Image: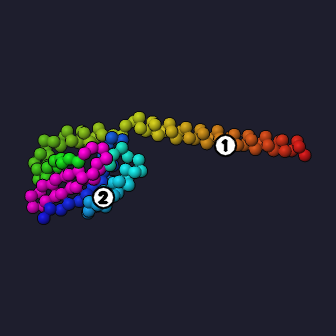
Amino acid sequence: MAQSLYEVHTLKGGQWVIDSTYPDKDSSIEVAKQLHGEKRFEGIKVIKDTFDPKTGQGKELVVFDTSKTARERPTPPSPAAKAADAPAAAAPAAAAARTKKKPKNQDVSVALKATGWLLVIVIGGLGVLFLINKAGALFSQGF
C-alpha cells in the first residue's frame, strides 16, 4: 500500500524549503494559502509525496503552486540505487555541498540595515536630550 504525505514548500531567496508536512491535502493547501497571503515568500507550493514500500519507488506531484501550474516530476532514486552510485558520485557531491553557502551580499545588507537603524536610534535619542535641555533652560529663565 502506497503512503502519501503532503509537504508545504516555501521559496525565499531563490531556495525552496519544506515548511511543514500534513497527512491530508485540504489542510496542507489551507496552510499554503495562509502563507501565500502573508506575502513573506516568493512562492508557495504543496507537493504530494507518495512512496510505495513494496517497490521502493516514490513519486511527487505538485498539487498547489503559486508560481507555476501543477506538474509531475521524478523523485530521486531509491536508497538501493543511491548506494550503487555512491562511490562514483561521492567526491562531486561533497564538493558541491561545501560550495553552497549563503550569499555574502545578503549578510552585508543585513549589517547595513542594522547599522542604519542604530544610527537613527542614537541620533533620535540625542535630539530628545537636546530638546529637554533647551526646554529646561527656557523654563528656568521664565520664572
Sequence-wise, the earlier of marks 1 and 2 is 2
- Mark in front: 1 vs 2: 2
What residue type is disc 2 on? Ser
> Which of the two residues, 43 or 89, is positioned nearer the viewer here?
43
Find out whether the residues at labels 1 and 2 contact each other: C-beta distance under 8 Å.
Answer: no
Secondary structure state at the residue bearing disc 2: helix
What secondary structure characterizes most of the magenta part?
strand
How packed mark 2 is, by other alpha carbons closer than 10 Å (few <14, some 14-19, many 20 or more), is many
Q: Is residue 17 visible?
A: no
Tell me the quarter of the image containing the N terminus: bottom left
Residue 55 inside the magenta-drawn segment: yes
Residue at x 63% of width, y 41% of height: 122
Secondary structure state at the residue bearing disc 1: helix
Residue that sits furthest to the front in the current view: 69
Name the residue beneath numbered marker 2: 28
What residue type is disc 1 on? Gly
Residue at x 16% of width, y 47% of height: 74
Q: Is residue 60 above or below residue 131?
A: below
Q: Is residue 10 left or right of residue 59?
A: right
Q: Quadrant of residue 57?
A: bottom left
Q: Is residue 136 visible?
A: yes
Q: Is residue 76 left or right of residue 127?
A: left
Residue at x 11% of width, y 45% of height: 85
Residue at x 52% of width, y 41% of height: 114
Residue that sits furthest to the bottom in the current view: 1
In percent of width and height, residue 95 lies at 24, 39
Q: Is residue 47 above or below residue 133?
A: below
Q: Which mark is residue 125?
A: 1
Tell me where the magenta segment starts and ends, as one range: 45-69
> Which of the two residues, 93 or 107, is positioned nearer the viewer here?
107
Residue that sits furthest to the right in the current view: 143
